[in-house]
Amino acid sequence: MKIVAVNVEKFHYRSKIVRDSEGHGHPGPEQDAVQSLLTIKTDDGASGSYFGAIETGTVEHIVAPVLVGEDPFYRERIWHALKERQRLNLSALPDRVLTAVDLALWDLAGRVLGQPVHRLLGAARDKVPAYASTMVGDDLQGGLDTPEAYARFALACKERGYPAFKLHTWQPPLPGAPSVKRDLAACAAVREALGPDVPLMLDPFHYYSRLEALELARGLEGLHFLWMEEPMDEHSMSSFVWLCEQTSLPICGPETAEGKMYTRAEWIKAGACDMVRGGVGDVGGITPLVKVAHLAEAFGMHMEVHGGGVGNLHVLCAMATPGLYYERGLLHPFVDYDAPLPWLNESVDPMDDEGYVHVSPKPGLGMDINFDYISDNRVGNRELSLRV
Ligand code: MG
């Protein structure tokens, strides 16, 4: 079996999420947005797909020359070949492109073998408890504009079935942000609303100083939080070692630091985290994320998976030392998260009333793609198709 084509289809959809000047999503007026579907096809008619922000030029000049002619089951070889091409093509070939290629190859393998990806990896479970993960704070009335608003929303999430809750608090460019005192006020309000037993987590502003991060950590110790993520710039690993040495609050990371499984290994060795963090989008796919999961297992640590989505869910269902939770979100009082994305016929992470997200039993990644929607909304009515 050989790969003969790599296709990128760009299509329009209507989005109700707007981005602020720092890139954080908030509910807003409906506007046009663009998504891409990457599909890898073989000489015997098999295919695998994944979505992502992928430029056709990158596929044409960097990805297709590596993939076309390859055996699609040689995922390690393909992943390393692309990773090595990042050195001189870093702006054109970010980790999110490696992620899309790797997930499309896993999807293809599952479809060929008639098995869902978590069973190919070696399944440990078929459902994972979720936590409600909020959008960052805002100034929308009835949104996430005050500590009390977070408390009200946390209660609504508990009612929906979520067993745990994570706050993303206020960030620039919002006036008054960042603020350690306001972050702690929101965390205290949520703790008071949900009572002492519900696991809570915080993901605050990411560029606090050491002393500000320690003040936050000490406050969260008293509120019995389960973990805190990324309160400082993750490029300063020494700052995280310093923080871990001074707080009993578990610190979870790294999340956005570049370097795939190599960075995670260094953080564990240095004592810069109590829980390892990684998601398919952070490290370049399922293939490297499984390495991080096994690395964490060998050190007796949890890997708490960053972000939702079908790739992360399959990895979570294949981890013997489990990640505690699936991150479901980002959630907001004005957003109907349970509705499927416009290009899918069903949600990839349906959650039952007990707060468990169930992995799809369908072959591959298990996404039910609405191909009619994609072709009806194709950008420029052009499909890039590269063939040998
Ligand atoms: Mg985070």
Image: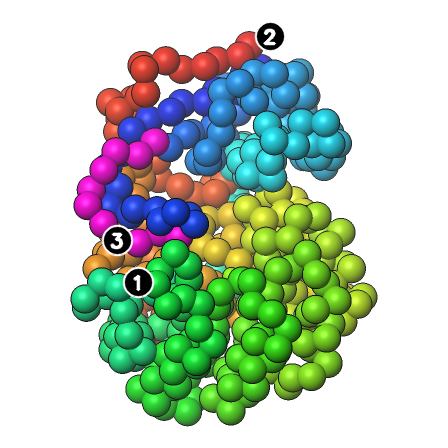
Residue named by callout 2: 388
* 247 with respect to 58 (left or right): right
* 375 with respect to 43 (left or right): left
**Residue 358, image x and y in percent?**
41, 59
Point out the stretch of residues depicted in magenta: 24-34
The answer to whether residue 271 of the structure is visible from this angle is yes
> Which three-letter amino acid code belongs to the residue tagged 1?
Asp
Residue at figure coordinates x 49%, y 20% from the top left: 56
Residue named by callout 1: 138
Camera-nearest label, 3 or 2 = 3
Label 2 element class: loop
Quarter occupied by residue 305: bottom right
Q: Residues within 10 Å of mark 2 (few under 14, many from 20)?
A: few
In depth, the one of 359 and 91 nearer the eye is 91
Residue at figure coordinates x 24%, y 22% from the top left: 376
The C terminus sits in image quarter: top right
Residue at figure coordinates x 31%, y 14% from the top left: 381
Residue named by callout 3: 27
In depth, the one of 30 and 309 nearer the eye is 30
Task: Give the mark nearest the N terminus, 3 or 2.
Answer: 3
